[in-house]
Each structure stands twice: as structure tokens, then as C-alpha cells.
Amino acid sequence: MKIRILASGEIRHIDNSTGTALVSAGLAESLSADESTRKLPKYQPTLITEPEWEVITTGVTKQELVIRMTILGGVYHYSGAPETANRKISWDGGFRYANKFGREIPKPILEQYKRQYKDSPNLRGPEGNGEPGAGACPENVAMAIEKDMRDNKGR
């Protein structure tokens, strides 16, 4: 135990029973352990990082309207239909958002996106222009066709 003797101001490390007796008699005061001797760092709560949201146009060959989320140096875009922007895919015990952000898009940002999406059909991405499956992976399409064929074979 670390104590300071009140009469002399001397700081000493002594056994707990003696230190407790001196402190209770009013002859010394207990001091906390020296911070430099700790083996683990003191716990400090982590600050929650909030993403930055904006509605912008982006693209090299064709400009597209997108919702951009920037968080911890990562930049993520959503360019689909506003109706499906906050769609959830659910299963027993959980869900996820289908918008690739992993979270709900804030209402003001989504309202701004809906307005601009409605007013600017030329800035919509391929799926927004009514081209079904424009963003679909060819392997997934082939597997879906094969699955349908197998499912319908027994009928």
C-alpha cells in the first residue's frame, strides 16, 4: 500500500495492515497506485463515429445521381431507386440493409435524393432507367436460370 505520512510528507510503500492502521489513526493518507506502474492502459470509452451524408452527381462517362456516405476514410455510394434505398433483408434473428451502407439512410438525405431522382431522369443509374438486372452479376443470373429449370423439371 502506498501512503503519505502527514507529519513529514514522506511517501512510503508499506504492508496493507500497517497502512490501514496509520490511515485510520489519522497519521497518514492513502495514495492510489502510481499510474506508470499499471500493466494495462486505463479504459477510455470509444467515440462513436458518425458518417457524413450527401447527395451528389458522380461518374466518368455518364453522370449519375448518388447518395454518398463517408465514414473513417471509406466512401460508399447508392444509386438505385429511392423506394428501395432503406429496404431490409430479414431472416430469423436478424436483418441487414440492402443499400450497402449497413445502416438506414437519414430521412432528410433520402427526401433530397427522391426529389432530385424524380426531377432528373437523365441522372439515374442503369437500374433506375428501367433496365432490369442491369447491375446483376452474370454468374448469379446463370445460377438463377439453372435453379428455375431444376425446380420446374418435376412439374
Image (spheres, rainbow, N blue to C red):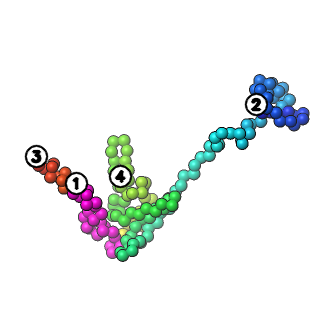
Span shown in magenta: 119-144
User: Is 60 a magenta residue?
Assistant: no
Looking at the image, residue 82 lies above or below residue 42: below
Tag nearer the camera, 4 or 1: 1
Kindly indicate whether the residue at mark 2 contacts the one at mark 3 (C-beta within 8 angstroms).
no
Distance Cα–Cα, label 1 vs label 3: 18 Å
**The one of 102 and 121 positioned closer to us in this rendering:** 102
Mark earlier in primary sequence (3, 2)? 2
Residue 121, image x and y in percent? 32, 73
Mark earlier in primary sequence (4, 2)? 2
Pointer 3: residues within 10 angstroms few (<14), some, or many (20+)? few
Distance Cα–Cα, label 4 vs label 3: 33 Å
Mark earlier in primary sequence (4, 1)? 4
Q: Is disc 4 placed on a helix, strand or loop?
A: strand
Q: Name the image quarter holding residue 40.
A: top right
Q: Which mark is residue 143?
A: 1
Q: Which mark is residue 154?
A: 3
Pointer 1: residues within 10 angstroms few (<14), some, or many (20+)? few
Q: Residue at x 37, y 71 (%)?
A: 64
At label 1, the amino acid type is: Met
Residue 72, image x and y in percent? 52, 58
At label 4, the amino acid type is: Lys
Left or right: residue 77 versus residue 40 is left
Kindly indicate whether the residue at mark 3 contacts the one at mark 1 (C-beta within 8 angstroms).
no
At label 3, the amino acid type is: Gly
- From the image, tell me which residue sits under label 2: 1
Kindly indicate whether the residue at mark 2 contacts the one at mark 4 (C-beta within 8 angstroms).
no
- From the image, tell me which residue sits under label 4: 88
Pointer 4: residues within 10 angstroms few (<14), some, or many (20+)? some
